Structures are given as C-alpha cells and as structure tokens.
Image: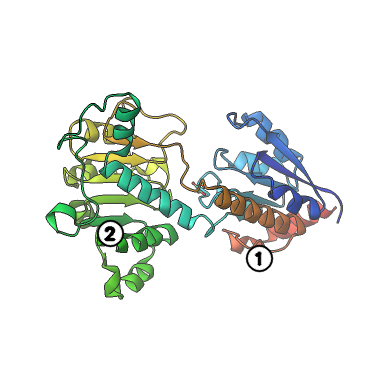
Amino acid sequence: MKERNVFMTRRIPDVAIPILRQAGATVTVGQSDEEKGLTPAELLAGVRNADVLLSLLTEPITRDVLNANPRLLGVANYAVGFNNIDVVAATELGIPVSNTPGVLTDTTADLTWALILGIARRIVEAHEYMVAGRYKLWGPNLFLGGDVSPGGTGKRKVLGIIGYGRIGAAVARRAIGFDMDILAYDPHNPAAIAADAADPSRHVRSASLEELLRESDFVSLHPLLTAETRHMISERQLGMMKKTAYLINVSRGPVVDEAALVRALRDGTIAGAALDVFENEPLMVAGLAECRNAILVPHIASGSQDTRDRMATMAATNAVAHLKGERAPNVVNPEVYDSAAYVARRSAASA
Ligand code: DGY
C-alpha cells in the first residue's frame, strides 16, 4: 500500500500511533496542546492533505470540511457520539464515518453514578467546607441531602432513565444495588426496555416522558443529540419534575436548555443537577457556576485511562479500515459502501 496520511485533529492516547503506522500511515497531529483546539483553517488544511481524518468531538465536521478533499476515505471519530459530524453529508459524498461504541459504556455509567451520589449527598459542598477549614463541630444538620437507596423512609426511590441504549441500560443495572425502581423512556429502543422489564429483579418499567419526569427522584439523560432531543429538557419539563428531584446529564449539553435549568436550580423547581456536558462547551451559561446545588465536571464521563486507551485503539482500527477501503468495524453509515459516490471516491484515492 502506498504511504497514506491520517490527520489526527488533536492528540489521542499513544496506543493509536503504532496501529496506524503498522498500516503504512504517516500520522499528522493538528494540535498537540491539550488546551487548544484547531482553527477552522487548520482543520481544512489538515483534511485537504489527509487520506483519513481522525476527529475528536471538539471539531465540527461539516459538509464544507468533508467537501474539502475528494480523496478523503473516511472519518474515524474518537467518541461514541458523532453529533459533531454531518453524517448525512458524509453519506452523500461517499465517506464512511465510524465511532467508538461499547468500550466506554461502563466507565460512563460509573461516572453517572458518581454524579447521582455526589449531588444527592452534597459531596462537593462538603469537601469544600472541609478544605476551607470550616468544620468545627459535628452537628445533625451538616449537609443534609437526599437518599438514593430507600434510606430513612424505607421507600424505594425512582430513577428515570431517558435514552435506554447501552449506557442507559448500564446505569439501570447499577441501580439494582440501591434497591431503586427504574422508569425508562426511549422511543427508539423499546426492545431493550422490554427485555429488562421482563426480569422482575431489575425493577424496570417503560414510561412516557411526562410520567417519568413527574415520578422520578433522579432523572438521568442518555439520548443521542438529534433535532428531536435538542432542549428536550426545558422549562416545561423541569416544571414537571418533583421539587426534591435531581437532574443528571452525561449525554450531550444541548439536550438541556441550560438557561432554563439555571432558573429551575435558583428558584427551587428541582433540588439539584449534576452535569458532565454543557450546551456550548466549554462555556457555561451565565449563573450556572454560582448554583450551589449543581455539580459541574468537564465532559469526563469516559475518562478512565484504560477506557481512553481502548477508544484510541478502536478509533485507530477504524481509521486503518477506512484507509484500506475495508468496511470499518464501527461504521455508523454502512449504506455508504453501496453508493456510487463511495466507489468514485475510492478510485480517486487510488489514482
Ligand atoms: C463520547 O464518546 O461520545 C463521549 O462524550 C466522550 O467519550
């Protein structure tokens, strides 16, 4: 195979590099500074010289970007979510797109649980109190929070899961240990809900969105970001939640109307929120940082060393398949392989 170039927009874990090199690829990294992104011009320049693009969720891979190079053989996204890529345009242009599903499910579900427990039991506030030297005397009213398990009331708490794909279901599995009831809402995944609901030990039940919002003590968001799910949690939906309930979002920021959430946190419409993702990352809407009843972390749900390495291996393996013109193991637009546009692109690339 002649030498090919993979343009990696930003550095991903080093395990990816030998996989790409062994396939005969040179690797160009667009930006090595962890705290800097690429300018649109740098992204375009990189794509123009690439056979395959290895992108991160921080780069919008628009139709213009995809159109910049008729020899581009594929886009391997280093993320399970691929809302940063115009997949419709990619398919029309004959470009396969791949992602990194499965390997980050458990790590993301674990972080969801860290946020559920952290917000309910006010861990961050209590930590700040300790390190500020404010703990003078134990008292019965220090940082009173909400229960996750039946706790003081003996009544099972309800966890509402919106988006019952791999991650939503993994979050539900962990709730068994906390004796919770699960309400699940996912119009695209009724079979997954039905399968778990069939096992009485799982305590899973399908619910409408409204029922879930009204009855849950915790609402955890796991849908894909689409036109349908953008702002699916806004003022009206927050108003349906219990005043004692908590909202957790590890999916994509724009699923929640962040300005409406700040109002709900300020006026006590809900008890608290824990967010891993933000509407306009890395920014936060005005007022969010000041909400004491919020835990805010910088999109780290899949951030364990092992998981990030596995994502890098998977993205590199997908990139190699794109380079070789083989079906990528995790392609998200498989129909592209049957298209005339893909065949034309492959012959342009080998000319
Ligand atoms: C993803 O993979 O989509 C996460 O948001 C980052 O790991």
One can see residue 328 in this view: yes
Q: Nearer the viewer, mark 1 or mark 2?
A: 2
Whether ligand 1 has any atom under 8 Å from the Cβ at mark 2 is answered as no
In which image quadrant can residue 64 be found? top right
* Figure check: 198 above or below 71: below
One can see residue 186 in this view: no
Whether ligand 1 has any atom under 8 Å from the Cβ at mark 1 is answered as no
Q: Is mark 2 on a helix, strand or loop?
A: helix
Q: Crowdedness of circle 2 by 10 Å Cα count: few (<14), some, many (20+)? A: some
Q: Viewed as shown, does residue 346 lie left or right of 338?
A: right
Please report the residue visible at 39 percent of the width from the left and 41 percent of the height from the top: 254
Residue assigned mark 2: 178
Residue situated furthest left in the rendering: 153
Q: Which colour scheme is used?
A: rainbow
Mark 1 or mark 2: which comes first in sequence?
A: 2
Please report the residue visible at 51 percent of the width from the left and 45 percent of the height from the top: 303
- For the N terminus, the image quarter is bottom right
Residue situated furthest front in the rendering: 137
| Residue 261 marker | none
Residue 164 placed where, x, y %? 37, 60
Q: Amino acid type of disc 1?
A: Asp
Residue assigned mark 1: 338
* Figure check: 31 above or below 206: above
Please report the residue visible at 83 percent of the width from the left and 54 percent of the height from the top: 350
Residue 206 placed where, x, y %? 27, 65
Q: Amino acid type of disc 2?
A: Phe
Judging depth in this view, the residue of 315 and 131 nearest the camera is: 131
Residue 182 placed where, x, y %? 27, 61
Q: Crowdedness of circle 1 by 10 Å Cα count: few (<14), some, many (20+)? A: few
